[in-house]
Amino acid sequence: MTTFAQGVSVLHRLDQFQPPALGGVMQANKPVVGGRTSTGELSAGLFYWSHSRFVGDFEFGLHRHEGFEIATFILEGENSHYDTATRKWATLHAGDVQIIRSGSGISHNERVAKGSRAFQIWFDPDYHAALALEPSYTDYPAARFTSRTVAGATVTDLISGDGPVEAHTEGLVVRRIAIDAGASARVDVGADRFTLGYVINGAATVNDSMVGADDAFTLNGNTTLEINAAGATDVFVVSVPNHPSYQPVRQR
């Protein structure tokens, strides 16, 4: 059951979108589909978020994207990728990030190894304007990302103004926060933003709301994210402006 407390909405795993296992191999849960959370909340420039586990090897086959900016974050295992911009295969490993700026259109294929786990997240970089841009694709290995220590937490900035990832989506910030058991982390997410977090592993209270592994949460009007970890906890956080300079495609 979805719970609400202290300006936080918790989307427990079973409250998220639950598609059938693809090919009997890919098991997914999705806190955001089509520009809304699974509770119907508008998610601004965050258009889609899928968390996938693979219980066997899987190949998606060549398929096309356009307009959206598509980021894949490898949590475990590996994902080999081919696209029609680079015309070559490349392999991503745990901690690596891939971004497809699909622009006027790009086709790609993915081969995912058994035991892999990943987020694929679609962002709206001004969809209709993006259709006029040349597509591009970039891999970012884990070694390119730097972390900082905040009390008992390690914060890795995956997409931000100072990070290596070149993203067109306005004001996009993506962080991964690892918190030691019994420790806490306080992170400023800024005003007038839509912020959604996902618990990769562990259990914690987020602004006084309890969350566990595979739960997601949104902040409603809060400018500070406070996480108090019951055990070692790993949280992934995406934040975008509530009101970007363009109208998100879901709201047109």
Image: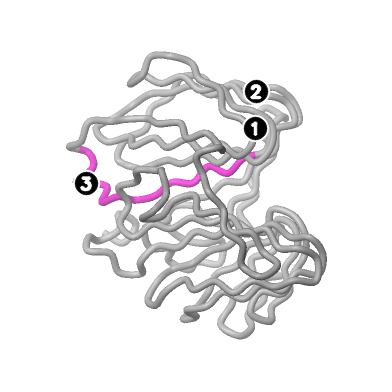
Label 2 to label 1, Cα distance in Å? 9 Å
**Badge 2 density bin: few <14, some 14–19, many ≥20, Cα 10 Å:** some
> Is 136 placed left or right of 151 in the picture?
left
Q: Nearer the viewer, residue 99 or 251?
A: 99
* Up/down of 98 relative to 48, above or below: above
**x%, y% of residue 85?**
33, 21
Q: Nearer the viewer, mark 3 or mark 1?
A: 3
Residue at 68%, 24% in the rendered image: 113
Residue at mark 2: 58
As for residue 191 lying within the magenta part, the answer is no
How many discs appear?
3
* Up/down of 9 relative to 71, above or below: below
Label 2 to label 3, Cα distance in Å? 32 Å
Q: Nearer the viewer, residue 2 or 133?
A: 133
Label 3 to label 1, Cα distance in Å? 30 Å
Q: Nearer the viewer, residue 224 or 249?
A: 224
Q: Indicate the amino acid at tag 1.
A: Leu
* Up/down of 4 relative to 125, above or below: below
Asked whether the viewer can see residue 202, the reply is yes
Q: Secondary structure at mark 2?
A: strand
Q: Indicate the amino acid at tag 2.
A: Phe
Q: Which mark is residue 128?
A: 3
Residue at mark 1: 22
- The magenta segment: 118-131
Residue at 39%, 49% in the rendered image: 123
